């Protein structure tokens, strides 16, 4: 069986500065995979390469199909929901309009309505605030909105860039709980970029650690959690 | 009092014309942060197309929507052919390109149709009707009705449809919109198409009043700038309100302020632009540009 997402010797950068020096990784269908590493290791760039936000060489395949030469919007339409750094909330629009942008390409009307019900069940605050401008939401609520919107896209793969960034521990726990729920009930694969390695390893089954644009370690999350040397030198806890 | 009311009604009619062109400016400004100086000339060319259709015997009410469709397609074509290749160029480059487009369209229209002013048909008679003691011409009322319908249609399109939603999303946050599967580049083209069609309405409405010739929109575009700036250059609703205020103000000033008369009405529009930029740079409905750090 081939993986849902495969990166093969991916190199990428911004102009003359190269950031990734040959990264290979795999995410299987319905699996949660963590991508860890220090600031500037290339985690965000890896996600951006997948959705075509940065030029890359090597190969990236989704479901066996190469994403080379595909525009961002086509990769997204092919089943990838990318919650970017900074969450990508459209602050000029209302909460409801943001959600609608998640589901606007879907043609399965009745299922969409069910998914909205589920979103409001996971995040009741979004129902209460749906007519308000998204700019009025707190950081945690904006992260919930971003996750809810990604869920409404009904993706095969979610790319989450630091969902815990800047949020209170209690909020983070709630959000990670929902990520797990979505993964389990809808069989959505997740590639999770996190600074908070402990949290990410608890959630994922497999993990990759990046060090200045190269893979330093890969292995099952349990293995990495249990290895003190790895934890001290790469994960910082 | 009666004269005042009449001036207000005809001011609202011209205001509707300014509002249409101002809305066209706002649509493109929202999409790419660019003031499209060629908007007036695009409207003028569309009006010549309407004129050609009508003089070939087409009914006014058929020629009108046909012209809007052609203007829509023309706007898309201009975005794809002229603007898109330089989309990422500095703003000044884009401004110069729209200025070049202005000259080009003006010269083309002159070469094809000549500079002799022509009378343009209006489906509304110039006879007046008495409403609550004030006399208003059918033409003014017709202009108000047509502008009103067009502006309402644009409002509903932007606020109530999925296409309108993606259009607004693409305009405000192109990167985030791409990640939601919005085809941003085509949304920009659509914005140009819509702006071109709305602008065409202003040309067709104003042509019976000021006669059709290649330079006819050059004063109207100044009023439209004033309206857009007054309303807050980013706000579609502001453009409409700004258009009405400018229309009424200019009309009243022309009659009641002795030294303004008919000659200095344009100066009133320029005074509005300067006044707004000095006193309230974001306009009536514009948001101050705040950035969260």
Image (tube, coloured by chain):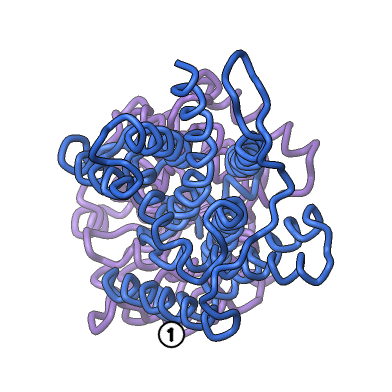
Chain colours: A purple, B blue
The location of residue A205, given as percent across then percent down, is: 50, 52
Secondary element at image label 1: strand
Q: Is residue B184 left or right of residue B97?
A: right
- Residue closer to the observer: B83 or A122: B83
Quadrant where the N terminus of chain B lies? top left
The one nearer the camera, B117 or B200, is: B117
Q: Which residue occupies 32% across, 29% down?
A: B256
Q: Nearer the viewer, residue A91 or B258?
A: B258
> What residue is rendered at 41% in x and 29% in y?
A141
Q: Residue B23: where, in percent of width, then height?
A: 48, 48
In the rendered image, the quadrant that contains the C terminus of chain B is top left
Vertical placement of residue B106 versus B242, above or below: below
Decide: is A41 above or below B266. below
Q: Is residue A170 visible?
A: yes
Residue drawn at (59%, 84%), measured in percent from left and top? B112
Within 10 angstroms of label 1, few (less than 14), some, or many (20 or more) residues?
some
Left or right: A88 in relation to A71: left
| Residue that label 1 marks | A57
Q: Residue furthest left?
A: B278
Whether residue B13 is situated above or below residue A41 in the rendered picture: above
The count of marks equals: 1
Residue B61 on image: x %, y %: 79, 52
Instruction: Choose top left, top right, bottom left or bottom right for residue B62.
Output: bottom right
Residue B39 percent across, percent down from the top left: 46, 63
* Residue beneath the point at 29% across and 29% down: A168
Left or right of A186 on screen, residue B179: left
Say if residue A34 shows up in the picture: no
Q: Chain under label 1?
A: A
Closest to the observer: A219 or B161?
Answer: B161
């Amino acid at each position: 069986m081939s993986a849902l997402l495969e990166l093969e010797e991916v190199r990428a950068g911004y102009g003359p500065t190269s950031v990734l020096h040959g990264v290979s990784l795999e995410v299987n269908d319905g699996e949660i995979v963590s991508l860890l590493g220090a600031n500037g290791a290339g985690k965000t760039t890896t996600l951006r390469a997948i959705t075509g936000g940065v030029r890359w060489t090597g190969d990236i395949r989704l479901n066996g199909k190469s994403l080379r030469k595909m525009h961002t919007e086509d990769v997204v339409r092919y089943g990838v929901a990318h919650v970017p750094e900074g969450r990508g909330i459209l602050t000029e629009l209302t909460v409801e309009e943001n959600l609608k942008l998640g589901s606007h390409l879907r043609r399965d009307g009745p299922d969409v309505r069910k998914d909205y019900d589920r979103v409001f069940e996971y995040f009741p605050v979004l129902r209460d605030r749906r007519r308000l401008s998204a700019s009025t939401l707190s950081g945690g609520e904006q992260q919930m909105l971003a996750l809810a919107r990604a869920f409404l896209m009904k993706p095969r793969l979610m790319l989450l860039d630091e969902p815990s960034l800047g949020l209170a521990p209690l909020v983070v726990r709630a959000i990670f709980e929902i990520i797990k729920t979505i993964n389990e009930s809808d069989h959505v694969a997740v590639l999770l970029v996190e600074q908070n390695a402990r949290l990410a390893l608890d959630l994922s089954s497999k993990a990759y650690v990046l060090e200045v644009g190269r893979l330093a370690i890969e292995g099952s999350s349990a293995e990495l959690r249990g290895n003190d040397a790895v934890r001290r030198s790469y994960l910082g806890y | 009092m009666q004269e005042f009311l009449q001036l207000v009604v005809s001011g609202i009619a011209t205001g509707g014309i300014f509002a249409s062109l101002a809305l066209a400016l706002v649509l493109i400004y929202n999409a790419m942060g660019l003031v499209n100086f060629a908007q007036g000339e695009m409207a003028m060319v569309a009006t010549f197309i309407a004129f050609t259709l009508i003089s070939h015997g087409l009914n006014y009410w058929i020629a009108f929507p046909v012209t809007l469709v052609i203007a829509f397609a023309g706007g898309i074509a201009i975005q794809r052919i002229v603007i898109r290749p330089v989309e990422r160029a500095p703003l000044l480059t884009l401004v110069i390109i729209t200025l070049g487009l202005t000259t080009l369209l003006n010269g083309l229209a002159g070469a094809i149709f000549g500079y002799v002013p022509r009378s343009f048909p209006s489906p509304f008679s110039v006879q007046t009707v008495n409403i609550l003691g004030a006399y208003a011409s059918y033409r003014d009322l017709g202009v108000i009705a047509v502008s009103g319908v067009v502006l309402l249609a644009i409002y509903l399109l932007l606020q109530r449809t999925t296409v309108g939603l993606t259009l607004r999303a693409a305009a405000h946050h192109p990167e985030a919109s791409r990640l939601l599967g919005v085809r941003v580049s085509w949304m920009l083209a659509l914005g140009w198409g819509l702006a071109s069609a709305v602008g065409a309405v202003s040309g067709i409405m104003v042509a019976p009043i000021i006669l059709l010739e290649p330079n006819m929109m050059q004063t109207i575009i100044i009023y439209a700038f004033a309206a857009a700036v007054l309303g807050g250059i980013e706000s579609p609703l502001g453009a409409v309100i700004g258009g009405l205020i400018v229309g009424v103000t200019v009309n009243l000033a022309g009659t009641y302020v002795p030294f303004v008369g008919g000659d200095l009405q344009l100066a009133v529009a320029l005074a509005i632009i300067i006044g707004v930029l000095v006193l309230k740079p974001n306009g009536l409905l514009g948001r101050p540009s705040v950035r969260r750090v």
